[in-house]
Image (tube, rainbow, N blue to C red):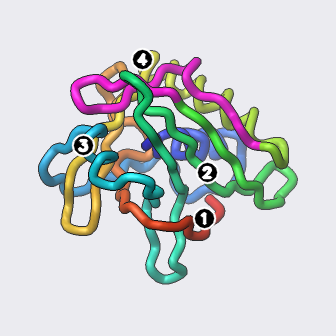
Amino acid sequence: MNKYTIAACLAMLAVAGCTVPDPFKMQTLDKGEPVGVVQMLAEHPGKIACIDYRASDNSCASLSKAQRVGNRIVAVETGAVRGLSGQIERVSLRSRGRIVDGATCVAPDEIESVTAEGGMGEFLQETTRLLISQFGGEVCARYFRVTDGFVVSSTGGNGKPFPPGDSRLRFVDAPLPVRAQ
């Protein structure tokens, strides 16, 4: 689960001048019991992670499908962003994170665009890589069990919270709509 890929992209879009509601505000959520990524995925086989579910329109900020491959978590996260042309584009980024003490840790070169449509995929890939580099060369996501799913908390290699801070994650059986960020 790599919610930080789309979140990092949103932060970089704000720098590029796109309209994004305060992407630099770090969100802090109450965290429950820590859960390792391998255990979390094993408890939800074949399911899709919905990041920041919103009940009012039954949508997610992004969707992520992940699997364990050896000592790595390979995930594809898909979101929707307003491109520089003003059109909404679906963007998918793949990460190949290392499993480190139950967390998923990703370096800049472990992020790649797998987007077929539009021009934002490569832009978001490069801006995500740049942001990870600026946060100490890697970002690690840790997972915490809460009543309605999980909280994902990401920290850069420099020890600072990675934008946008904490996010909620819940598993769903089928993809839900992603809302434009």
Q: Are marks 2 and 4 in contact (CB under 8 Å)?
A: no
Residue 53, given in percent of the width and then of the height, sits at 44, 68
Mark 2 or mark 3: name the one nearer the start of the chain: 3
Residue 181, given in percent of the width and then of the height, sits at 62, 58
The residue labelled by disc 4 is 136
Mark 3 or mark 1: name the one nearer the start of the chain: 3
The residue labelled by disc 1 is 178
Seen in the image, is 39 located left or right of residue 14? Answer: left
Quadrant assignment for the N terminus: top left
Q: Please, what secondary structure does the residue beneath circle 2 have?
A: strand
The residue labelled by disc 3 is 39
Q: Nearer the viewer, residue 86 or 120?
A: 120
> Which label lies toward us, 1 or 4?
1
**At x 83% / y 58%, what residue is drawn?**
86
> Identity of the amino acid at label 2?
Thr
Query: In 3D space, how far apart are the residues under numbered discs 2 and 3 (Cα atoms)?
Result: 23 Å
**At x 29% / y 32%, what residue is drawn?**
103
> Identity of the amino acid at label 1?
Val
Q: Please, what secondary structure does the residue beneath circle 4 have?
A: loop
Q: Are marks 1 and 2 in contact (CB under 8 Å)?
A: yes
* Number of the label disc, if any, that sits on residue 78: 2
Query: In 3D space, how far apart are the residues under numbered discs 3 and 1 (Cα atoms)?
Result: 26 Å
> Which region is colored magenta?
96-115
> Which label lies toward us, 3 or 1?
3
> Which label lies toward us, 4 or 3?
3
Seen in the image, is 104 located left or right of residue 15? Answer: left
**At x 59% / y 23%, what residue is drawn?**
130
